[in-house]
Amino acid sequence: MFRLLDKYILKKQLVTFFFVVFILLTIITVIDITEKMEKYVSNNLSLAEVVGYYINFIPFIANLITPLTAFIATVYITSRLAGHTEIIAMLSSGMSFRRMLVPFMIGGLIIASLNIWFTGWVIPTSNRAKLDFEIKYLEKMFIFSERDVHIQTAPDEYTYLRSFNNTTNIGQAFSLEIIKKNELKEKLQARLIQWDDETKKWKLKDWKYWKMEGEKEIVETGVELDTILAITPEDFSNDYRRYDGMTTPQLNEYIELLKVRGASNVEVYEVEKYVRYTSPFTVLILTFMGVIVSSRKSRGGTGFRIALGFMLSFVFILCFILAKSIAEVGDMEPAFAVWIPNIIFGFISLLMYKNVPK
């Protein structure tokens, strides 16, 4: 049965969590506005446009800092309880330390559940408008500059472009080959291809089609041809933090598409995918550690415990950034790399738990 004391701790934990989120968001938003003000002015943006951007920016940041704010809130609440000798009173009354952890972990579970929902489905929807704004006004104009582009668009289908201009949506020296069992079965070539926004099709100029049917060879040529291809101009657009605008199911589908195409940047998207899966566990681990770190009354008082909490948060961020960077360049399996901070801090928490008076 959920006791009055459990409700008291849970309420204080959640209220403090949202208060810490509000304080940090205020600080981060003010800093961000200060850094970007010059770009807002140079682009002649209205107040409504800037406010619209921050309506989408704030939920993104709030969700991003959720694990650390949950940790800080837990440290603060537990330190306050320890400072007022409330934890000593609980343990003296016969309550075990494990039982005292229950309301804190329930609070962590609620926060983790919100994190899953927001990260996977809510935030990506609002992020699309945020990313569009950043690409249009805050980032440099994107020019697709790669040469000799090879894309595997299906298991047996390979597309080649010598170059592509993403401002005019025109590609030069196009070819599409279908190869089965190491044999070329079909080939479509064109001097250039151009995207038609109205029909959502490609226009092929000076094209030639070749196909093998048994021992018979079919060759067709033409001046212009409208056709649908497996590629779109989106494949050559700015991929700046594209994963932020994808829901978890969309992200999984896009990763599979990149793998089929043999893309070189698939690790970046895999890291984002696994970070979304590990983030809720991070909340629970840091909540658990927060209670252990702050449950003893110390001479340094609440301030010392909070400072210790910030220090541990900083160490966690360093571990996370290092592991993420290594995984994104392909030097470590993404699924393992993003778990490294959780494994380290989970192990440390268990060691600390063994030394806590119960």
Image (cartoon, rainbow, N blue to C red):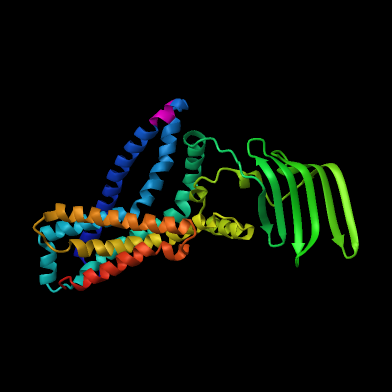
**Which quarter of the rendering shows the N terminus?**
bottom left
Residue 49 in which image quadrant: top left
Q: Nearer the viewer, residue 273 or 53?
A: 273
In the rendered view, does 55 fall on the left or right side of 73?
right
Q: Is residue 48 above or below residue 187?
A: above
The x and y percentages for residue 276 are 44, 58
Which residue reaches farthest right? 216
Q: Residue at horizontal 24%, vertical 54%?
A: 311
Q: Is residue 40 magenta?
A: yes
Query: Eyeballing the image, is 191 above or below 102?
Result: above
The residue at the point 84 percent across, 54 percent down is 210
Q: Residue at x 31, y 54 (%)?
A: 68
Q: What predominant SS class does the magenta segment belong to?
A: helix
| Quadrant hosting residue 214 | bottom right
- Vertical relation: 347 (above or below) 40: below
Q: Quadrant of residue 41?
A: top left
Whole-percent x and y of residue 309?
A: 23, 56
Task: Name the residue nearer the viewer: 186 or 110.
Answer: 186
Instruction: Estimate the x, y position of residue 225 in percent, counting from the top left.
Output: 81, 43
Q: Position of residue 196 (x, y in %)?
A: 72, 39
Which region is colored magenta? 37-41
